[in-house]
Amino acid sequence: MLRRNFIQQIVFSTGVLMASTLPYGFSRLLAPEVKADPSRQLRPPGALKNDQAFIEACIGCGLCGEACPPKCIKFYQRDGGSKHNTPYINPEEKACILCNKCMEVCPTKSLTLIPRENIDMGISQIDRLACYPWVDRGICGACVSICPLGEHAIGFEMWGQYRPTVKSGCVGCGLCVEVCPHPSLPIRIVERSQGTVMRHQI
Amino acid sequence: MNGDNIKPFFLWKHLNKLRWLSLISIFTVLIYLPYAHLYQTYESAHAYDLLADSEKFIYDTMETITSPFIDDPIEDLDAIKGNTWSGTFFGFKLSDPLAVISQIFSGMTIYTAFLLTAALPVLLTFVFGRFFCGWICPATFLYELNTNLAAGLRRAGLKTGNRRFDRRAKYLVLTIGLILSAISGSVLAANIYPPAIIGREIYYAIALGGFGTGAVFFVATLMFDLLVARRGFCRYLCPGGALYSILGRFRLVRIQRVVENCNDCAKCNAICEFGLDPLRDDFGQECNNCSACIAICPTDALTFKIRMTDSHFQGPGHLGRQYSKAAR
């Protein structure tokens, strides 16, 4: 009789143990990992540079999205794996305007308030085989005129031929990506280390 | 007994209505906030004429609602943001203690500014116990409606779940959740904690055009409550409830039984959402001071008292049949 009770208790506690991990497994099952193009999923401005550290710090409250005036911050809603519920910005749909509101409102250190020049979401890179002025298909300059950081970030090439050139002051907000009229989206936001600014500066 | 019938303060009987008012208003605010954000985005885009008709309707409605109170929607509507998981309230940041503790476990670092946002909820929990679960949690609102639905179904002759499990299972969920957070390096509690899910999913549904996965999980918990155990998720699985129970173990404000007025009718045991045993003075750390038992007690035998621990079983109620038998 005692042994029977003992076995019953063992079975019961194992069941409770398994049932208690069930919600966690369930939540991970619902949010599968996706391999997305990193140029389409930037972290909001002021985010920790190491993405794993960002995931550890973010509690998924959605405050940054709720404070964002252009509503550019989206969330991994049905996917993302361990990134689930964390914010991202897709500059091709809607780009960041560098208004600092998300950094001010974030309760954790995942988004910390830093000066505008120190924001590092990436750096934009222009495909010179597609951009209209670079292939001599007209005069554009949309990216240069929209840039909130002015001539430190993007400017025309020498002799003012309306050929846009990214400079090292670019913080990767992505407004140029959003505004670019070319259908093949010749501007991408890439990691600062992968950007080609240093290589083709005149 | 010798005429010393202590009547509880008469307003305690109506606290349950106040609680429902609080739950409804918090849920309404959670629905209002995404619309306020949409209104802010439309306002900051400066293009009323380009909005679709449905968006114009939202803009006009929100303008009518908010214009008496504010001048500049873009700045002034930022006063209240977020949800019960974490939010700003007139510049004062508040977070759920569970958010703070799981963030500490997942990141293995302590960020003081974030830690302080949970100070006020923790202090209130030390005084009022697990009051968040009964008075504020937006999921509680839906769970209690679900309980009422279950009662209606039972009256219609359908069978609803009324199983009982070990209440300590939720402490296991909390512990395992924190360990898994530390291993996987993400705040897992955010995915399974109903108030966090509700606050976020309402925002997703209204402002971002569709529910996320949390809604599926929340519906699953509703079905669990309906088909397996009454308020089962809160009672047996909720990690936040476990944390609040631990913090509120030595709470100061407790519901206690006045044995002189009790007639052993056991209505308090039937109404208690958390399956506690007020009839035998067994409130424990899991009482959320929701005052539903005070509201239903026909003889005013339950009241608030200020003390650190529950009284031991005081015997059968003095107005009950058992007591007169025992006294004879």
Image (cartoon, helix red, strand yellow):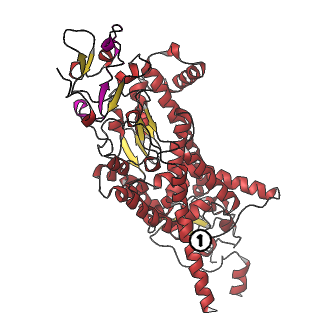
- Residue at 27% in and 10% down: A162
Is B108 colored magenta in this rendering?
no
User: What's drawn in magenta, residue-wise?
Assistant: A115-142
Which quadrant would the C terminus of chain B be assigned to in this image?
A: bottom right
| Within-10-Å neighbours for mark 1: few <14, some 14–19, many 20+ | many
Residue B136 can be seen, yes or no: no
Is A128 colored magenta in this rendering?
yes
Q: Look at the picture and state if A182 lies above or below A110.
A: above
Q: Nearer the viewer, residue B49 or A46?
A: A46
Q: Secondary structure at mark 1?
A: loop
Q: Nearer the viewer, residue A65 or B164?
A: A65
Q: Position of residue B229 (x, y in %)?
A: 66, 63
Q: Which residue is mark 1?
A: B258
- Residue at 41% in and 25% down: B74
Q: Mostly what secondary structure, the magenta segment?
A: loop
Q: Position of residue B18 (x, y in %)?
A: 58, 49
Q: Position of residue B302 (x, y in %)?
A: 60, 66
Q: Amino acid at mark 1?
A: Val
Q: Nearer the viewer, residue A20 or B156?
A: A20
